[in-house]
């Protein structure tokens, strides 16, 4: 008869079953399977179980909570760069360069103009406003001219930043396992990495982390930014300039 007692003032849910099978030669072989369920947390970090056979201690199992590690499963939102904003402009008289036909009416934010070549290779917006014309403004025609300008962003360095959210957090529970056999004559220690509902087999034991309960942690739903080596919480309300 195997009896299990909890130590370190913890509650242990004990259940045992006898599993028997018949060998090809007709002999009956039985195995005793015991299941122990207990709880660990950041306040009660250590638990132990003692196994007795005919009132004799045969083994003590100790579990010590080390840490709970959460790994982010990323959902990439966008990539951006650290930029410097610049402006380039160009004045054209009527019927000159891009200032023809409908003049500014034909210009939109994504228009690429040869007069603004310096800024065309960078993300930005193109604008046009009517300006003065005639001889007083250096133009032949009396019709109004065009003032083209483009606001664009130039990278300040070579770093690429990624902004992302975590749509899921994978839990990894680290616990130090100690097995003491024969009144301390044999001690075995090992740090186990357990994931919820995934059994971990060691010797003749199966260790399973059933559930992990966490307090509300608003930071886990934050938006993050990283350059590949460092990570920070992105608290800005507006999205950055895309590069």
Image: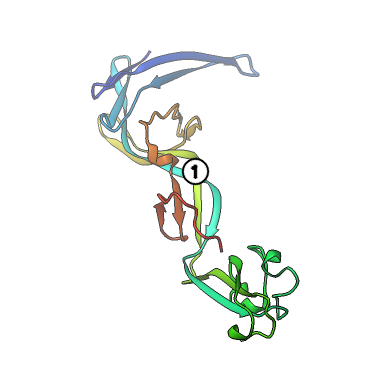
Q: Residue at x 49, y 46 (%)?
A: 165
Position of 219 with respect to 126 (left or right) is left
Quadrant showing the N terminus: top left
User: Does 171 sit above or below residue 61?
Assistant: below
Q: Is residue 145 visible?
A: yes
182 vs 64, nearest the viewer: 64
Q: Position of residue 163 (x, y in %)?
A: 50, 53
Q: Is residue 121 visible?
A: no
Q: Residue at x 46, y 44 (%)?
A: 71
On the image, numbered disc 1 is attached to which residue?
166
User: Label 1 neighbourhood size at 10 Å, few (<14), some (14-19), many (20+)?
Assistant: some
Q: Quadrant of residue 103?
A: bottom right
Q: Position of residue 153 (x, y in %)?
A: 52, 68
Q: Residue at x 32, y 14 (%)?
A: 54
Q: Quadrant of residue 15?
A: top left
Number of numbered markers: 1
236 vs 27, nearest the viewer: 236
Colour scheme of the picture: rainbow
144 vs 18, nearest the viewer: 144
Mark 1: which secondary structure? strand
Quadrant showing the C terminus: bottom right
Position of 38 with respect to 78 (left or right) is left
Q: Position of residue 198 (x, y in %)?
A: 51, 32
User: Does 194 sit above or below residue 163?
Assistant: above
Q: Quadrant of residue 133?
A: bottom right
């Amino acid at each position: 008869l195997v009896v299990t007692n909890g130590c370190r003032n913890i509650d242990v849910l004990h259940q045992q079953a006898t599993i028997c099978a018949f060998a090809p030669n007709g002999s009956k072989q039985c195995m005793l399977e015991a299941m122990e369920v207990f709880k660990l947390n950041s306040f009660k970090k250590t638990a132990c179980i003692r196994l007795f056979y005919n009132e004799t201690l045969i083994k003590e199992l100790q579990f010590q909570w080390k840490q709970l590690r959460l790994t982010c499963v990323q959902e990439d939102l966008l990539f951006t760069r650290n930029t410097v904003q610049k402006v380039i402009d160009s004045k054209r008289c009527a019927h000159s360069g891009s200032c023809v036909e409908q003049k500014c009416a034909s210009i939109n934010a994504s228009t690429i103009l040869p007069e603004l070549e310096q800024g065309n290779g960078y993300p930005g917006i193109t604008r046009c406003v009517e300006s003065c014309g005639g001889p007083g403004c250096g133009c032949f025609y009396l019709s109004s001219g065009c003032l083209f300008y483009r606001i664009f962003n130039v990278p300040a360095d070579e770093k690429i930043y990624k902004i992302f959210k975590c749509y899921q957090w994978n839990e990894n529970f680290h616990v130090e396992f100690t097995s003491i056999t024969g009144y301390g004559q044999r001690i075995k220690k090992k740090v186990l990495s357990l994931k919820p509902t995934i059994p971990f087999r060691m010797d003749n034991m199966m260790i399973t982390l059933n559930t992990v309960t966490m307090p509300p942690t608003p930071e886990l739903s934050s938006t993050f930014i990283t350059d590949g080596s460092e990570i920070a919480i992105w608290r800005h309300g507006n999205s950055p300039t895309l590069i």
